[in-house]
Image: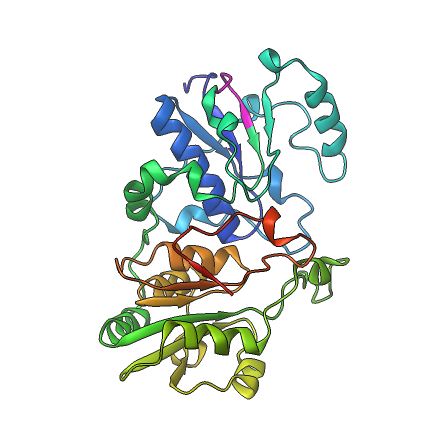
């Protein structure tokens, strides 16, 4: 039987978000020498996008949390878990099992400085500061458990043979599982305009042999509006990819232009080119000032 002193990390959101949460858990586990398990159910109850646990496609070390490891209230559906948050937040720190993210998009050293036994981590943890010491381990674990399809493998070989630039054009943020906008999510997150992608490519530089591999949730719109002075290949037209395969195709490119998306954030971060150029949007969320969002590594260019 697993120790009841193991920490637990809540998984929620899409693939990119779950990778941040996984990375936090693995980072704490390696640093503190403690076991870590993952709550793969609570965070997906009542999810408006219909998202589910998605990390089983990778070679990661996923241990599913048992019900006895999940603190009271964490499995309650939204918005009732807010009642649980108020209760846990009122408990003195020495006995408070639930660790809530206090500084979204920022590294909070206090989170990992002194980990309470059997702590439950609730947040997105979108900053590489939580896992930089284990980056090599994560790069090994964020590989496909089952080999990619033949068409994906062939495209990866094609990408490796040119000056490749991945470009992620995200248009449909905030569209729920039923095909309808979720509240004001689209307005709050915002999206990158065509000018951003054109300027980003200028910043990376257009050299002979440059090929732009375009990844988009709305390829028809993107193809009709994107005008770039290089050869563009729309990945969805070449092969049908799973989300994980698409992300790893992004990672196989030499350089990266990302949207305000954790999905393409990981596609760029996992890229192995030591001289890679990465361009990210300066405004990550329209609802927050630029200074409030510290999600991108210092070596990335913000436009």
Q: The magenta stretch spans which residues?
A: 115-120
- Please provide percent x and percent y for residue 200: 46, 72
Magenta stretch: includes residue 236: no
Dividing the picture into quadrants, the one containing residue 208 is bottom left
The residue located at (46%, 57%) in the rendering is 265
Residue 63: in sight, yes or no?
A: no
- Please provide percent x and percent y for residue 128: 43, 43
Q: Quadrant of the N terminus?
A: top left
The residue located at (35%, 49%) in the rendering is 142
Give the colouring mode of the picture: rainbow
| Left or right relative to 73: residue 135 | left
Q: Is residue 173 above or below residue 222?
A: above
Q: Is residue 295 above or below residue 263?
A: above
| Left or right relative to 187: residue 248 | left
| Left or right relative to 282: residue 277 | left
Number of marks in the image?
Answer: 0
- Please provide percent x and percent y for residue 65: 50, 30
| Left or right relative to 83: residue 134 | left
Foreground of the two, 159 or 58? 159
Residue 102: in sight, yes or no?
A: yes
The residue located at (27%, 69%) in the rendering is 153
Magenta stretch: includes residue 116: yes
Foreground of the two, 65 or 259? 259
Characterize the magenta stretch by its predominant secondary structure. Answer: loop
- Please provide percent x and percent y for residue 38: 48, 34
The residue located at (30%, 64%) in the rendering is 252
């Amino acid at each position: 039987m697993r120790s009841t002193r193991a920490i637990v990390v809540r998984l929620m959101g899409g693939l990119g978000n779950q990778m941040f949460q996984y990375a936090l858990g693995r980072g704490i586990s390696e640093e503190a020498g403690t076991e870590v398990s993952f709550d793969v159910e609570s965070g997906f109850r009542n999810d408006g996008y219909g998202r589910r646990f998605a990390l089983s496609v990778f070679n990661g070390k996923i241990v599913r949390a048992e019900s006895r490891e999940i603190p009271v209230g964490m499995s309650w559906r939204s918005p009732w878990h807010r009642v649980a948050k108020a209760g846990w937040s009122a408990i003195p720190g020495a006995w408070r099992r639930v660790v809530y993210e206090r500084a979204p998009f920022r590294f909070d050293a206090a989170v990992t400085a002194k980990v309470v036994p059997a702590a439950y981590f609730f947040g997105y943890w979108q900053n590489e500061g939580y896992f930089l010491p284990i980056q090599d381990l994560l790069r090994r674990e964020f590989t496909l458990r089952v080999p990619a399809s033949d068409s994906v493998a062939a495209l990866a070989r094609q990408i490796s043979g040119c000056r490749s630039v991945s470009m992620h054009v995200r248009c449909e943020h905030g569209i729920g599982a039923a095909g309808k906008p979720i509240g004001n999510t689209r307005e709050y997150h915002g999206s990158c305009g065509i000018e951003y992608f054109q300027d980003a490519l200028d910043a990376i530089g257009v050299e002979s042999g440059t090929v732009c591999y375009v990844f988009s949730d709305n390829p028809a719109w993107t193809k009709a509006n994107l005008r770039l002075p290089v050869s563009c290949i729309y990945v969805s037209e070449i092969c049908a990819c799973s989300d994980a395969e698409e992300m790893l195709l992004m990672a196989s490119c030499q350089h990266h232009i990302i949207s305000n998306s954790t999905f393409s954030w990981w596609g760029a971060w996992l890229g192995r080119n030591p001289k890679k150029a990465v361009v990210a949007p300066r405004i990550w969320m329209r609802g927050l000032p630029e200074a409030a969002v510290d999600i991108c590594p210092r070596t990335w260019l913000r436009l």
